[in-house]
Image: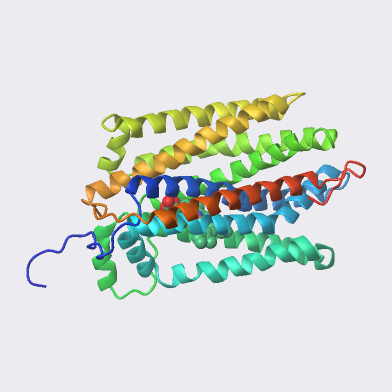
Amino acid sequence: MNGFPLPPVPVPGPVPQPAPAWILWGLLVFTFMLHLLAMNFVVGGSVIGAVTARLGRRGGRPHHAALVHWLTQAMPIALAATITFGVAPLLFLQVLYGRLFFTSSVLLGWFWFAVVPLVMVAYYGTYLLAFKSASLGRWGGWIRWLTILIFVTISFIFANNMSLMLRPDLFRAIYASGSTSHANLSDPTLWPRYLHFTLAAVAIGGMWVSGYGLVCRRRRPEFGQWAMRYGAHWFSGVTALNLFMGFWFLFSLPRETMARFMGPVPVATAVLGLGIFAGMATMTVMFLAAHAPRPAPLVSGGIGGLLVTVVCMVLVRDQVRRGALATMNFEPVPWVEPQWTNISLFLVLFVAGAAAVVWMVRALVMAGRPETGDGPV
Ligand code: HEM
């Protein structure tokens, strides 16, 4: 050290941004939203599947068994979608915030390395459950809970990384401590952030179940009505609890970051206000759906409300990042040399890929057989 304090934010490498920042940011937010929706099916659907399998053991509950069957069969596909939709925001995150994200990943060390093997083990678990469940016997239940444990562990590692990358002021001290695997446990935002994400995943898993009931209500009316109400119970109950986590997360933020939402940055105040309003309205609608004789219109409205909520909350999360980094004097790389051919190619392949996914999901949902009431999905 020569007596001049180094700035906490690592200096950018001599590489220009491959596209204007607003394009990279738009793609980061959009692809992250897709990642979230798929990840919520994986985490929430697994939790709901495990609990429903347990409840279904009591006998005389064919709908429970049919729902567990669908969730189990769809899980490997949903996990593939989670990973694929995770790669895209990973690219944009690295381009926009690479010097923070790479540093926090290095400091997390072995925890960060663990993500890939954990995903692989969980993948085997979902495949075993989907294709060998008949021969697994009592092991099936254990494998279900083990995959859930792995999913929530992966989420925890991500929450650690996403919160640590906002604290460049800690980087040097952690690095100097010589630790090869640093979890960001002393960060007051970590637990509320993590619990808020995890509960939201379970709630949105409930919305996926209601949505599935909505789609198959004509072919399998009894099951469809039941699934809509059952998912609505999960959504409204877990969201009621999650409101507290959301406020805990907000109040755990550093004062300057939280202040951003109280007026000085109108877009931050607007997305937070609209997000809370949409979330509470969706919760109310789904509570009514859980008890309605004809829940379909309410579930459709609930899905719309949820999409608005998710968009707002992803933007709130972005504002948290901007606010936290503004206090660290983080400046984006100003040097831009757009690679339009690559960007266009990405967009074309992305649209084609998304269309293929929509087609596959449609085929999967439509594969149910009305005669048996117990289709393959
Ligand atoms: C089952 C597997 C996975 C689960 C449960 C999961 C869960 C999560 C969660 C909870 C977050 C939010 C963390 C926070 O902000 O506190 C997150 C963010 C993220 N995940 Fe995943 N994830 C999974 C797999 C993956 C994979 C395989 C990739 C990449 C190949 C990935 C890429 C990302 C990225 C880039 C973000 C941050 C995006 C941003 O900050 O804008 N995820 N994930």
> In the image, 240: left or right of 297?
left
Q: In the orientation shown, which residue stands out farthest toward the right?
A: 371
Question: Colour scheme of this structure image?
Answer: rainbow
> In the image, 294: left or right of 89?
right
> In the image, 87: left or right of 38?
left
Image coordinates of residue 257 in percent, x first then y, are: 29, 42
How many numbered marks are there? Answer: 0
Q: Quadrant of the N terminus?
A: bottom left
Give the answer, above or below, for where 282 lies relative to 132: above
Image coordinates of residue 142 in percent, x first then y, are: 71, 64
Q: Is residue 141 visible?
A: yes
Image coordinates of residue 308 in percent, x first then y, are: 51, 33
Residue 266 falls in image quadrant: top left
Q: In the orientation shown, which residue stands out farthest toward the front?
A: 341
Give the answer, above or below, for where 146 lies relative to 331: below
Residue 267 falls in image quadrant: top left
Q: Is residue 186 visible?
A: no
Q: Residue at x 7, y 68 (%)?
A: 3
Image coordinates of residue 254 in percent, x first then y, are: 29, 45
Give the answer, above or below, for where 33 lies relative to 343: above
Residue closest to the eye, 151 or 341? 341
Q: In the orientation shown, which residue stands out farthest toward the left?
A: 3
Q: Residue at x 48, y 49 (%)?
A: 32
Give the answer, above or below, for where 366 lies relative to 131: above
